[in-house]
Each structure stands twice: as structure tokens, then as C-alpha cells.
Image (cartoon, helix red, strand yellow):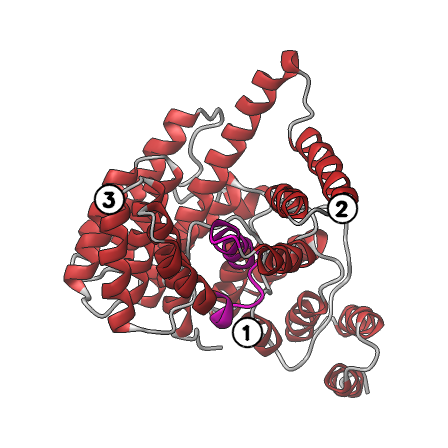
Amino acid sequence: MKKQKGNKQRVRNKRPSHQGGVGNTRKRKSRLLMLGGVCCVVILGLLMTRSLWHIGDGSAGPREYTEESLEQETMTVLNRLVKDFPESADPLGLMGDIYVELGKTAEAMKCWEKCAELEPRRASSYERMAHTAVERGEFERAVAIANKALEIDPEMPDIHCQLGRALRGLAKPREALAALVKAVRITPESALNHHLLGQAYQQLQQYEKAKQSYMTALKIKPDYTETCYGIASVSALLGEKEEAAKYRKKFKEMKTRDWETLPEKRDYVLQHKLLVKSRRRASKTHTNAGILYFERGRQQAAEKHWLRAAELNPTNTQCREELMTLYQQNGRNEEALQICEQLIQFAPGNPQYHMCAGTLLTRMNRIDDALLAVRQAIEIEPNNVTFRRIYDQIQKRRW
């Protein structure tokens, strides 16, 4: 199966991610289905086999991790990418995203400025710069960057949001309102856009519209703490005392929930979370590095990075999908199947993983196992005609 060029766009446009998950896009689902035309898997016990993570490639890394060692490893990978691909904006874009996660926003801005020099029409670089400039309180700079981005793509989903935030920071509420109205029009499913629009209406004393926007934000994101405070505020201004009291209470409950860890345990919890976050960040960097190397025909380097990504984050499904595809393409069916079994352990309700394993099992002439796995996929999606057709095709091989 040929790797689709669309992966490059996926890496290029990827923001510092707070969401994990694989199989989130239609393209990735189709990739998984394409792994065979025939599918199945036997759910075995937990298989985090050593051979998958330590195949003598020198990528195993340290047994003990610290934030410092993980940050150093992450930056080493990124610097190597920049050196290996000096004419590409992709490594610099990834480096900028990581700098933001590390709180080094000045360095991030420099990376994205270089991205813009290499690819002047690359709108995502401007969007990232505008967002970071707002976070840094550089509102005039953010406005200039946002306007430049809008010259490239007037319908860019996030740039109107950043423009609105910057204009509010410059005490230009009417201009901010206009930008945020456009942001909501372009991305109506964004709770943040509706929340910011509510703030803009509230600043202009349009309290009914403010409340409507806040309520929409809360409907999209029911645990939006700040929005509850906004609703309580405008309800009070509208003279709706019971409504204001209701949402003040809800706001206080959410605030308590947001930070309910006991003080004596808080330091430990924070330290643990930071280390986990550092490992995930390094894992994500290795995953993206592998994609860039794979796209340029350097499969051995790609495999090394994906193996390291899997070791750093045992629940990183994206790097395992990439490894599974790589092994399948090169006829390494046993290794591909082991990876697929791991993915099934992580997401047993994902029928695509069962289908991928079925393809591999069929190629290995393990027909009974393949049929069992396809039945598992059919149980998850009983109305999937393709699954049933594939099951019939596999069954014919028994005769």
C-alpha cells in the first residue's frame, strides 16, 4: 500500500496538540481499511513485546527520564530535522510548536518567521505567530500578522479569533466584535469563538446577545468554567437574579472541580504530570520526524523514530499505525500484526484495527483467526456491507 502524500499536510498543519487519538480523520480510516481488503484479528493478551521497541537500532534511550533529558532529546531531533531538510518549512514549524509548549515563545516566533521566509504563502505560520503574539500581549504585532494571514486566506478558521482577541487588547471593541462574528461564522462549532463573542457583546453592553453567545459556548462545551462566570455576570446585569445565582453556584462548583487536589499532594501531582507531558511531547516529536523522513524515502530513519516514539509513550497510536503500515508494505507481516494487536488493546472498539489485522492474518494463511477477527469487526459495525463481503472472501479460502 502506498503512503499517501496527505501525511505531509497533516504534519505541516498540526498545532501543539491537546488531543490525542488516531483514526480521527476520514483519511486515516481509509488508510486502515486499505491495509487489506481482507481483515481480522484474534485478541490476544497484552503484547508490548520487547522486539517491537528494541530492534537493535540504537533508539532505546535511557531507562530513567527527567524533564531535562526529554527536552534535550526533543530538541536534538528537531535540530537534526532542520539540518537534514534546510529548504523545508516543516521542521521549523514543528520546532516552533514545541517551543510554545516549553514556554519559549520568543524562540517559537523566530521559527515561524523563518517558515514564512521559506514559504511566504504558508498561512498556518502566520496563524501561529498571531496566536503567540496575543499570548505575549503584543497586540499591535498580532493585528499586523493576522492581517497578513488574511491576505493569504480570508477564511482561515482561527485567524479571525486571534484578530478579535488582539483588537480587544487594543481597546477596540467594535472592531473586535466584527472579527469575532466572522470567527463564529467560519467555525460555529468552536466554544472558544462563541465565548469570546459573548465577551465582546458584554463589553459593548449588548447583554442579551452576550448571554446568547455564552449559552451557545456552554452547550458546545458543558464544562466551560469561564463561560458559567460570563452567564452569571450578564444575567445579573439583566436583572435575572435567580439565573445569576444558579450560574454563580455552578461556576464555584466547576472551579472547585478544576483544582480539587489537596495542597500537600499538589506538588507531586504536578511533577508527575509534567514528566508524563514531557514524554508525550518527545514521543510526538519522534512521530512527526518519522513522517518527514518517510515522505523523503528514508524508511530506516523513519522506523527508528517511530520505535522510539512508541517506547516513550506506550499509548501513542499514531506512531504504531505508521509502523504497521511500514511493516506491511515491506512484507514484515509478523511485526505488523504485533503492532496491530497493541492497537486493538488500546481501542478494541475500533473495527478498522480488526480489519487491518485480518488482512495480515490472511496473508499469513491463518484463515480461522482471520475469520474470527472479521466477525469481531462485524459485531462492532453489523451493517457494514464491506466487512461482510470481506468475510465471505476469506471464508472461500478455506475450501
In the image, what residue type sits under mark 1?
A: Arg
Q: Using the numbered discs, state the Cα–Cα distance from disc 3 to disc 1 in whole angstroms.
A: 30 Å
Which residue was labeled with disc 1? 31
- Kindly check if marks 3 and 1 are in contact, taking CB atoms under 8 A apart as contact: no
Crowding near the residue tagged with mark 1, few <14, some 14–19, many ≥20 C-alpha atoms within 10 Å? some
Secondary structure category for the residue under label 2? helix
In the image, what residue type sits under mark 2?
A: Glu
In the picture, measured across the screen, residue 52 lies left or right of residue 243, that is left
Q: Quadrant of residue 394?
A: bottom right
Tell which of 90 and 283 is nearer to you.
90
Quadrant (top left, top right, bottom left, bottom right) of the C terminus:
bottom right
Q: State whether residue 152 is above or below residue 319.
A: below
Secondary structure category for the residue under label 3? helix
Q: Using the numbered discs, state the Cα–Cα distance from disc 2 to disc 1 in whole angstroms.
A: 49 Å
Tell which of 236 and 29 is nearer to you.
236
> Which secondary structure class fits the magenta region best?
helix
Residue 200 position in % (x across, y down)? 47, 54
Residue occupying the point 75% across, 72% down: 370
Instruction: Tell me the mark number nearer the camera, choosing from 3 and 2.
Output: 2
Q: State whether residue 49 is above or below residue 24.
A: above
Closer to the chain start, of discs 3 and 1, is 1
Q: Which mark is residue 243?
A: 2
Residue 25 position in % (x across, y down)? 56, 69
